Image: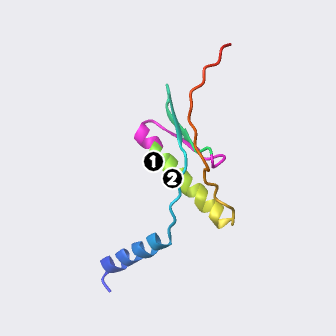
Amino acid sequence: MFPATETNLSKEIVSAKSRVYRFLVVIEKDKDGYFAFTPELQGCYTQGDTYEEVLENIRDAIRLHVEDRLDSGEEVPQPESVSLTSLEVAV
């Protein structure tokens, strides 16, 4: 077999076994850059200097978090509903 064929076959096997998960991601901007976290996955958060960087970082953090849960036999939580609102509070 040619190496390129083996590589393509490996990718097909990996993608055939993969499952796609969808998570809510909250991204906040402050003076130091961007902070992102995933409410469904406690402790899954990251930061980045740019919006694009924080998106890439949170995607990696989620993937590692989910892989760890699956390897441990834990359930991967999925959101049942998502609500986003703004609330004014007088103090």
Q: From the viewer's perspective, is 3 left or right of 79?
A: left
Residue at the spot x=44%, y=76% of the render?
13
Q: Where is residue 87 in the image (x, y as percent from the top left)?
A: 60, 24
Amino acid under label 2? Asp
Q: In which quarter of the image is residue 3?
A: bottom left
> In which quadrant is the N terminus drawn?
bottom left
User: Which mark, residue 60?
Assistant: 2
Q: Residue at x 56, y 27 (%)?
A: 86
Residue in the image at 63% along x and 58% along y = 76
Q: Which mark is residue 56?
A: 1
Q: Does the magenta stretch include residue 89?
A: no
Query: Where the C terminus falls, by quadrant?
Result: top right
Q: What stretch is highlighted in magenta?
A: 40-54
Q: Residue 24: give x, y in percent of width and height.
A: 55, 45
Q: Which residue lies furthest to the bottom in this view?
A: 1
Residues under numbered marks 1 and 2 in contact, where contact means CB atoms less than 8 Å apart: yes
Q: Residues within 10 Å of mark 2 (few under 14, many from 20)?
A: few
Secondary element type, mark 2: helix
* Dot 1 amino acid type: Glu
Question: Where on the picture, by quarter, is residue 9?
Answer: bottom left
